[in-house]
Structures are given as structure tokens and as C-alpha cells.
Image: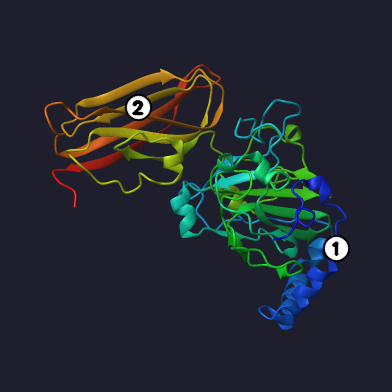
Amino acid sequence: MSSARKFPDEPHDLPGRKIPSQSIDWVLANKTFGIARSAFLAIVFFLLSSQSFAANEPPKFILPLDCEIGTHCFVQNYVDQAFGPAVEDHACGRLSYDGHKGTDIRVADLVVMNKGVSVLAAADGRIKATRDGMPDRDFRDAGPEEVRDRECGNGVIIDHGGGWQSKYCHMRRGSILTPNGHFVVAGQKLGLIGLSGKTSFPHLHFEVTRDGKYVDPFTGLHQRKTVSCNVSQGIGTLWKPSVLAALNYKTSGVISSGFATRKPDIKKIERGEFKKLKASVEVPVLLFWIQIYGMQTGDKSETIVNLPDGSVLAGNRKIHEGTHKAQWYTFIGKRRPKSGTWPVGTYKGRYRLTRKAADGVWREIFRVERKIELESSVK
């Protein structure tokens, strides 16, 4: 495993660092990739990017994950552009936390992670540093001391030239494919999304710097205040147009939802324990749960579970009086009737989130519906 000195976890360590000579020698002598392939990739990289580097233009990034935004993955946290303890993303929203310097693109749970979601080079460049060997686990289980100075976890740093670098954090142990010194092209697989370093959910932390200074890829070198909060403008963005369109900003959304036959605490949800749940009419408890991102102070939640005949089994309406929550979950349901069993049929769980807009009108942010069949017996 590369040391923390080889793989800086803070951008102020990045400028001027050189890859140790032994790493360069290893790349040139590596039998798997070989000198011929290294030379070929170097030529391709030069032809594709020399014009941009000569002009010192910023890179244009593709999505650094092989997934469909909004379906299989989504952005949970953006770069914090506010000064001091305040929190504000590029759209003047709250999808960030104090001092956050990257873009967090997550998958729903460990089931999705374990299937393998590829991390991709966002632009052409040379591998400057890598780290591997850190375990994939919720850092809260081991304690922050276990990841001190290694918060990024397993990861890769790519030098794009002109002072531009991109960093890929929290990758899966043993998945990193690209040794130091090798040239990569946009879309080339670097490894897999994981749960290493200081994180409690599977995601890729994608970070961009220029000359060691953080840059928000949504606004580039433009200060967010100079381009307003109109996210559709795309002024200064480092994303390619098709990627920016896919990364459509949403203030809140659903991470996952479903039914459970026991209390669905957040760790069980993150492990995907309630996916493809099958249940019989004899289960002692029936609960509908939902996990969302971007819960804001004053939001109204409506959660309802309907019996097969359409009548209400359980319902709850409440206003969120707490602070903004990057992640939030709730569940509702009841115990099995004392008469014996649940009615056979389709049960529906529904959730609706509304928010008061600046004009004073309450508007729906999203709604979701899930179903489960309770059978007389489950094989």
C-alpha cells in the first residue's frame, strides 16, 4: 500500500510533488502493461491533449463513474462554496457540509457496490499517485483514528497538465488497475467504487484542484457569486455538456425505499438487507421505510401504508423542525393483527415531500410508491 506521503489526502500537499523514481522504474519494467503499451498510451495522450495543455486550458470532464445518474447513482454532496461555518453549494442550496471540497456521487447501498461500479478517468492524464489496501467498512465502526491522514481511502490522483489534477477517493480495496506514471484516457477504468477511508456510505469523492487550490467542477474558475445561482447557465463548468445535463441539480431525492418485517435501522438499509423482500401473512410486523437526501428545515412529510382493500393501515404527517440533513430516513407500520394473520394481497407504501417556496406556495418535491405482496406462505 502506498504511504500517505505518496498519496496526499489534502490538496495543499499536491503542488510540486514528484512520483518517486522507483515508481517510474516499476511502471517501465512492469510485465503486465509492458513498455510498448506505456509508450503507446503516452503517444495517444500526447496527441489527444497536447493542444489543450499548450493553451493551458482547463480539462473537460466526463462522468467519473460508469452508472446512470438518477437511476443507479446520484450526487449527494457538492463542493461547499461558502466562507466560514455557513454551507452553500454552487446552486445556493444546502447539498454539502462545512468545508467539503469535492463532489460525492453515491450508489444506494452495499449490494450495488458489491456488484461492481467502475470508477473512470474523467479526462486524459498521467497517474500521479495511488493508494490501495485500506478495508471497505463504515469508518464509524473502527473509529476516526483508523483513517487519520488517510481520509481519502483507496484512491487515484491524475495529473491533467497545466496545474490541473483530479482525485478519486473511497475506492474498493484491491480494485485499482493503474500504476503510478501510466497515461490514461478519458473513460478508462481506474478501479471500483468502494467504502474505504472516512466514509459511512458507498460513493466516489471526486475532487478537482488547480495549482493545489480546490475548484468546483460545476463552476470552474468562476466564483459562484459571479455566475448567480442559475445552475442551467453552466458558466465556467468543467463538465462536458452531456454530463452537465445528466447531473441535473435536485435539492432532494430518494436514496432507497421499501418494506421490512423488522426495524429497518440505517446500517441495515445501507447493507441492502431489505431488497427483494418476500413476506407471508404471518410476519409479526410490517413496516414501510424510505431513505432520502436533502431534507430541509420546514419540509412536510406524508407517509402512508395501505392495506390490499385500499384502507389505511398506518399514516403520518409531520413537519421537519430539525436542521438540514444530508441523509434522513423514516419508517411507519404496525404489528400483525391480534386476530391472527395479515390479509393476503398487495400492500402499498407511499411517501410525499413538499416544501414552501419563496413565493409562499407549497410545492411537491417528489413522491414515491412501493408495493409488497403478502402471500399465504413464502417458499
Q: Amino acid at mark 2?
A: Thr
Of mark 2 and mark 1, the one earlier in the sequence is: 1
Name the residue: 76% across, 34% down.
226
| 192 horizontally vs 43: left or right | left
Query: Residue 109: x, y in percent?
Result: 46, 47
Of 11 and 351, which appears nearest the observer?
11
Residue type at mark 1 is: Ala
Near-viewer residue (55 or 144): 144
The nearer-to-camera label among 2 and 1 is 2
Per the model, the C-alpha gap separating discs 2 and 1 is 57 Å
**Which percent across, then down, holds residue 373?**
21, 43
Q: Residue at x 69, y 81 (%)?
A: 31
Identify the residue under disc 2: 303
Q: Quadrant of the N terminus?
A: bottom right
Q: Along the horizontal axis of the image, is 79 left or right of 70? A: right
Question: Neighbour class for label 2 at 10 Å: few (<14), some, many (≥20)?
Answer: many
Disc 2 secondary structure class: strand
Mark 1: which secondary structure? helix
Q: Which residue is located at x 42 percent, y 41 percent?
A: 268
> Could you tell me residue 7's position as x and y percent?
75, 55
Residue under circle 1? 54
